[in-house]
Amino acid sequence: MEYLIQGSVMIEKKPHFITFDNEIQHRSLWGDVWRQFCMHKGALAGVIVFIFITLLVSFGPLIHGIDPSTINFRERNLGPSLSHPLGTDNIGHDTLAQILAGGQVSLAVGFFAMLISLVLGTLIGVLAGFIKSLDGPLMRLTDLFLALPILPLLLVIILLFRDTLRTLYGPEAGIFLLIVFVIGITSWMHTARIVRGDVLGIKEREFVTAAHSIGTKKRRIIFRHILPNILSPIMVSATLGVANAIITESALSFLGLGFPPDFPTWGRLLYDGANFIQITPTRVIWPGVFIALTVLSVNYIGDGLRDALDPRLRGK
Amino acid sequence: MLNNNSILKVNKITTRFLTQDGLVHAVNGVSFNLKKGELLGVVGESGSGKSVTVLSLLKLLPMPPAEIVSGQAEFEEQDLIQLDVNQLRKIRGGKIGFIFQDPMTSLNPVLTIGYQIAEPMRQHMGLSYNQAHKRSKELLELVGIPNARNCLSSYPHQFSGGMRQRVMIAIALACNPKVLIADEPTTALDVTIQAQLLDIIKRLRKELGMAIIWITHDLAVVAGMADRVAVMYGGFIVEEAPVEELFSNPKHPYTLGLLKTIPNLEGKRAEKLESIPGQPPNLLVKPLSCPFGPRCNYSFERCNRENPTLIDRGKNHKVACWLNADSGERL
């Protein structure tokens, strides 16, 4: 116990880990995680920025009120003004409206593509690491995917399936599904490799044998004993995955394989603006700033989550 | 011998490892009987096959490279060696508990103590999370951890080595096992903690009435704890006897040498600690002669020709040696 002396009164200050049976507050796991997460200043800043961007692209268009597809040749290549806070492009689109609309798509693509690649990569990595007979085939498959030239592959997939999906789900939803899927299945390989390596190391540890010795089922050993131990590399590749997906989507849109030209995404805006960088440099700067901020904030969040989820780092 | 009060009957277990250098003959036909409520001490130097023997019983060895070539282990009218993994899983942790050597690495660092103690109970006794949680608290109190409720939500790194080993004991005892296998449970701990844990095991053994196989290097621990002792060397049991008989009247030259190595507290201080000259046997060579022969002061021609079998020399004292230590007669 510490005692603080204030004036003449002695105040008993209770340490937070007080351990008398009748006085303990049960600390929940997620409470602990949240407390540790808040200690990470970068992560906290990341959360604030990310929430801000998400709110902006979700509700911004309602407030701003200009349709991103409105074309007005009289008001082209304008600088910032009250009616067009970020100016207009060469055919009179409002840049802010386009960035807000594009943000919705880019964020959604980044998030869902990351999810697909994460699940796929973790699954393949865990299977390869845990089941010896699957290790060879699955890792060669991973090598195969890594060796494939991604861009021609994307080209073929998109050419093959674009029209089918378009007729099935409509032009926008169809393309969205296709892009998310394509990015997801071409970016899981690094996660799989990292996860496999970690699983190989963890499964030889004594606590896994100990888990076997109390009769734990294999599935439970994988999910409850091994997976939580490799959470940090998974977290890191998840956050990198979001950034990667946003950038890949930009590249696809640039090649005309992504969303249709009148359908704004951050990557598309960036590439379209690149031709006009001398006339209206803000057209390049703003999408770039948004991509960078999103990627950075997601990375910091991942960093903080990793620290918070590791009980060995927690409480230090 | 009366077999109806034995709970685990191990018969000629042979385990080999297939390595790059060839076959390692780790355990070569080890047989023993564990009676109900008995504490069997297994002693021997590193690499004598103590751990591999008990790990083979529950098939906890990585297979391959390990391979159980032959043998039976009769437990509750089942042969453990013949069971497949799914059937074994019901026995592991449920009816046979296991304590590992190193408490620092045997607990999962990212799961709470409470979860890890509750796991076997949820697995084997079908308890709900809350029931298991309640019993976990009792178990922690049983193994002498104060403030058990708070400890349940702690993580292993917040515990000291002794506390972790208590947790390991609590996990092993969670489902009231009939047999507890302790694989050098006190080796990684300092002497005071070791003494505390030995007391706990002694007390729990009386309270719960389980049979224990206690593997150790430490002859002092065995002398204080065990009912019966088996001495292992080179993958064989070379001598097996009730504890007092073994310490007062060792019959195998290896046991004799082992007992001589214990420094004496009383009397004149020896110049040098006793040791047994030579190296442990090379397990890559198939043992056809007495494994201790090359290091034995008493060896003679037959020792290099034939491997002695474990023979009862009276008073339940079994020795595998061609020399009759009592009469000096060469068999």
Image (tube, grey):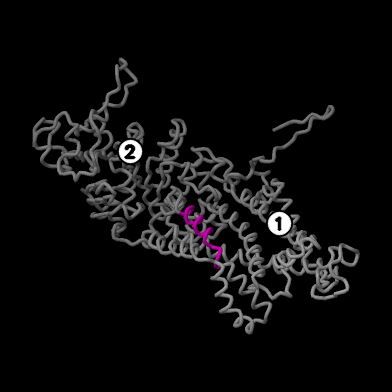
Q: Which residue is mark 2?
A: B226
Crowd around label 1: few <14 · some 14–19 · many ≥20 (10 Å) = few
Chain letter for mark 1, please: A
Dot in front, 2 or 1 = 1
**In whole angstroms, how far apart are the C-alphas of marks 2 and 1?**
68 Å
Q: Residue furthest right?
A: A82
Q: Amino acid at mark 2?
A: Ala
B57 or B65: nearer the eye?
A: B65
Secondary structure category for the residue under label 2:
loop
Secondary structure category for the residue under label 1:
helix
Q: Is residue B84 above or below residue A22?
A: below
In the displayed structure image, the side of residue A311 where residue B64 appears, left or right: left
**Residue B193, position as x, y percentages in the image:** 47, 34
Q: Is residue A133 above or below residue A299?
A: below
The verdict on a common chain for dots 2 and 1 is no
Q: Is residue B5 visible?
A: no
For the magenta stretch, what is the residue range?
A185-199
> The C terminus of chain A appears in which quarter of the rendering?
top right
Q: Amino acid at mark 1?
A: Ala
Task: Write the residue at 70% across / 37% down.
Answer: A15
Do labels 2 and 1 touch, CB within 8 Å? no
**Magenta stretch: residue A205 in it?**
no
